Amino acid sequence: MKFAEHKENRLAKMRLGQSACEVTALPSAPDTRVALVPLTDSEYIRALELADRALVGDNPAGFAVRDELQKQAVIYFSAREYGDLTSMFFDDVGEAGELDTHDIDFLYDVYLEMISNQSPSLFGLTDDDFEALKKVWTMIEWNALTGQQWYAAQRFINSIQNELQAASYSGLSSIKPSTEMSESETLAASAE
C-alpha cells in the first residue's frame, strides 16, 4: 500500500469514527465535548516547532513557556469536533491557548493517557536506554519534586501501582507497602 492510500484510509476511518480517539468534556464547560486523536509525526513536529519559535530565554521560565506552548499546539492538532473527527475543534493554536489553564492541562493529560497504550519499543528505546533510565530513576530526589513534576510523578506511580505491589509481595526489598511496619515499629507496638 502506498502512503497516499494509507493516508486516505486513515481519513476514511476518521470519517467513520473508527480512528483511535478519546472523547472528553472540558472541565470548565461540561456540555462541551471534544474528541482527541493521536497526532501524526508531522503534526507533532509542527507542535514542537511552534513551541520552539517562542522568543523566550533559555532559563526555567523560558522552558516553562515552551512547555505550555507545546501543550497548546498538541491540543490544537489533536482536538476534533465530537462526531466529525476530520473537523478541527480550534481554528488556530491561539484559540487553543485561550482555554483555561485547567482545561489545557486536563486535555493534555487525556491526550497523554490515550497515547500511553503504545509500546516503548515504538519509540526506539533500546535495552541500553532502559538501563540508563533505571540509573536516572535511582538518582531522582523525590522529596525535591514540586508542582508539575510532582503531579507527573504521582500519576506515574498510580499508573504502575499493581506492578509496585506485585514487586513488593515477591520479596523485592526496595519497595515496601506503606502499611508495612519496620522492625523498630513492630517492637514498639508490641511493648505497649
Image (spheres, grey):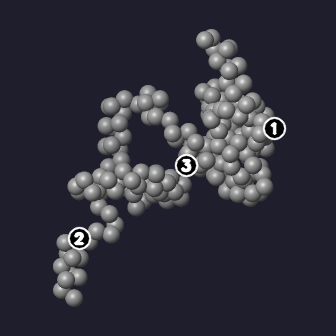
Q: What kind of residue is marked 3?
A: Pro
- Badge 3 marks a residue whose secondary structure is helix
- Judged by depth in the image, the label closer to the viewer, 2 or 3, is 2
* Residue shown at the point (63%, 25%) measured from the top left: 42
* Residue shown at the point (77%, 39%) measured from the top left: 83
Q: Which residue is mark 1?
A: 91
Residue 29 picture location, percent across and down = 77, 57
Q: Which mark is residue 63?
A: none
Residue closer to the observer: 72 or 189: 189
| Displayed quadrant of residue 91 | top right
Q: Quadrant of the N terminus?
A: top right
Q: Residues within 10 Å of mark 2 (few under 14, many from 20)?
A: few
Residue 2 picture location, percent across and down = 62, 11
Above or below residue 172? Residue 115 is above
Q: Which residue is mark 2?
A: 182
Residue closer to the observer: 161 or 112: 161
- Badge 2 marks a residue whose secondary structure is loop
Residue 144 picture location, percent across and down = 42, 59
Q: Which residue is mark 3?
A: 60
Q: What kind of residue is marked 2?
A: Ser
In this rendering, position of residue 181 left or right of residue 27: left
Calculate the distance from the C-alpha at mark 2 to the C-alpha at mark 3: 40 Å
In this rendering, position of residue 19 left or right of residue 183: right
Calculate the distance from the C-alpha at mark 1 to the C-alpha at mark 2: 58 Å
Q: Quadrant of the C terminus?
A: bottom left
* Residue shown at the point (45%, 56%) measured from the top left: 158
In this rendering, position of residue 156 left or right of residue 70: left
Q: What kind of residue is marked 1?
A: Asp
Calculate the distance from the C-alpha at mark 1 to the C-alpha at mark 3: 30 Å
Above or below residue 177? Residue 25 is above
Q: Residues within 10 Å of mark 1 (few under 14, many from 20)?
A: few
Is residue 63 in view? no
